[in-house]
Amino acid sequence: MAGYVSFELPDEIQQKILEVFDLARNTGKIKKGTNETTKAIEKGTAQLVIIAGDVNPPEIVMHLGPLCDEKGIPYAFIKSKAQIGTIIGVNVPCSAAAIIDAGEGKNALKEIKEKIKKTK
């Protein structure tokens, strides 16, 4: 996916993103998987989207970044599907996920959105 990833987020920011997704999973609402994430972006309900950097073939998730850009939704690439699967509470790797309601992670989500904007 080297040609598709337009920026690399530092590990520290990736870790904070995963922490916010964990909080949202426990106290708010998230969407799991490429299809649910795509629908949330299209509806404009996604607040933050994560996409796995190790999806093969990359065409499975290639539409998510441009769609997020079109809708003005921040997104970030996370190193692996396994990391996303673990943090969203499923026992299988997951290609993408979206926060719909950050729950107790609302302030942290705001901070992460700013960091992502500065990185792009």
Image: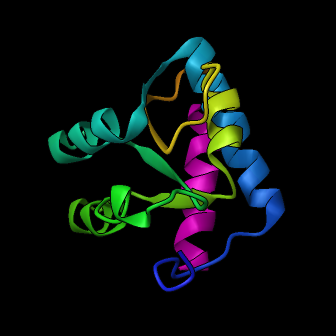
The spot of residue 96 in percent (x, y) is: 47, 44
Does 90 appear above or below 111?
Answer: above
Does the stretch in magenta take in 55? no
- Residue appearing at x 75%, y 47% in the figure: 16
Q: How many marks?
A: 0
Q: Residue furthest top?
A: 27
The spot of residue 66 in percent (x, y) is: 29, 69
Does 49 appear above or below 101?
Answer: below
Chief secondary structure of the magenta span?
A: helix
Quarter of the image holding residue 32? top left
Q: Residue furthest front?
A: 57
> Which region shows up in magenta?
105-120
Does 114 appear above or below 25?
Answer: below
Quarter of the image holding residue 39? top left
- Residue appearing at x 83%, y 58% in the figure: 12
- Residue appearing at x 26%, y 46% in the figure: 41
The spot of residue 67 in percent (x, y) is: 25, 62
Q: Residue furthest bottom?
A: 3
Given residues 79 and 93, the one toward you in this image is 93
Does the stretch in magenta take in 108? yes
Does 45 appear above or below 118?
Answer: above
- Residue appearing at x 69%, y 58% in the figure: 79
